[in-house]
Image (cartoon, rainbow, N blue to C red):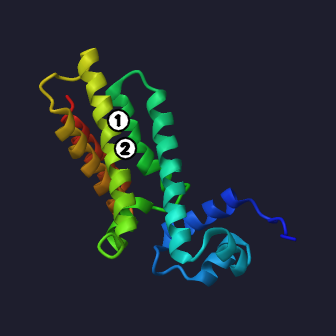
């Protein structure tokens, strides 16, 4: 008779996600995961598979988390510009609560050239963020808040590229003031 699990899969997966987010894939050992997740090694293998499978599940969990956060931010605004600005500012604020940077950016930098599945997942996440920006820009053009001369697709890529850059710079010694000035300049193209 199979034993019932004595842990919540969602909770331990979030713990794994945070550890991979903080340390990266290569620097995270199975023992680190056992210690951080608070479950036995056998339970990790039985529930999630090997380290790579757990990492992929963590990346999927991260996508759900970040998508939810961005959608929540966007729903709180009637202004497209303020919604886009708050998505950028969320990145600054999130480093106070979560590991710095971005798990999808970290995964892309560390593993995309080595692992096709990680590459596919990271690229899909990046395209979803670009699509989110593109939809916002289209809304802004329709409402008259943004110029109809803006190329929505190109602007979405530009904004996303700046968002990725911000996620990288936040891991360095840039000051809050410097990061805020980068956001202001990036958003000025919407004026």
Q: Secondary structure at mark 1?
A: helix
The single residue placed furthest to the top in the displayed view is 143
Image quarter (top left, top right, bottom left or bottom right) of the N terminus: bottom right
Point out which mark residue 84 bears.
Answer: 1
Which residue is at a point 27% across and 41% down the rendered structure image?
Answer: 184
Q: Relative to residue 183, is residue 100 depicted above or below?
A: below
Residue 126 place in picture, x, y as percent? 33, 51
Badge 2 local density, few (<14 within 10 Å), some, or many (20+)? many
In this orientation, does residue 172 appear?
A: no
Does residue 35 appear to the left or right of 181 in the view shown? Answer: right
The reply, left or right, for residue 191 in relation to residue 20 is: left
Question: Residue 171 is drawn in which quadrant?
Answer: bottom left
Q: Is residue 42 visible to the viewer in this orientation of the structure?
A: yes
Q: Which mark is residue 88?
A: 2
1 and 2 marks in contact (CB < 8 Å):
yes
96 above or below 108?
above
Circle 1 packing at 10 Å, graded few (<14), some (14-19), many (20+), is many
Mark 1–mark 2 distance (CA, rounded to whole Å): 7 Å
Q: Name the residue nearer the viewer: 43 or 35.
A: 43
Q: Residue furthest left?
A: 149
Name the quadrant containing residue 49.
Answer: bottom right
Q: Secondary structure at mark 2?
A: helix
Which residue occupies 54% across, 55% down?
61
Q: At 83% from the left edge and 65% from the top edge, which residue is drawn?
A: 4
Q: Can you give x and y, in whole percent of width and height, for residue 159 in the image? A: 26, 43
Q: Position of residue 19 (x, y in %)?
A: 56, 69
């Amino acid at each position: 008779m199979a034993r019932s699990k004595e842990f919540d899969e969602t909770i331990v997966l979030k713990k794994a996600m945070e550890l991979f987010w903080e340390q990266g894939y290569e620097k995270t050992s199975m023992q680190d995961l056992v210690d951080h997740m608070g479950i036995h090694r056998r339970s990790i293998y039985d529930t999630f598979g090997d380290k790579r499978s757990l990492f992929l599940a963590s990346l999927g969990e991260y996508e759900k988390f970040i998508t939810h956060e961005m959608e929540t931010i966007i729903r709180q605004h009637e202004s497209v510009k303020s919604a886009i600005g708050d998505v950028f500012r969320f990145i600054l604020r999130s480093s106070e609560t979560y590991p710095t940077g971005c798990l999808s950016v970290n995964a892309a930098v560390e593993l995309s050239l080595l692992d096709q599945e990680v590459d596919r997942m990271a690229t899909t996440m990046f395209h979803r963020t670009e699509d989110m920006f593109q939809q916002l820009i289209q809304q802004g053009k329709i409402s008259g808040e943004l110029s109809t001369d803006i190329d929505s697709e190109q602007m979405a890529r530009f904004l996303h590229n700046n968002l990725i850059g911000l996620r990288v710079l936040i891991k360095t010694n840039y000051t809050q003031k410097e990061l805020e000035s980068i956001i202001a300049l990036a958003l000025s193209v919407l004026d």
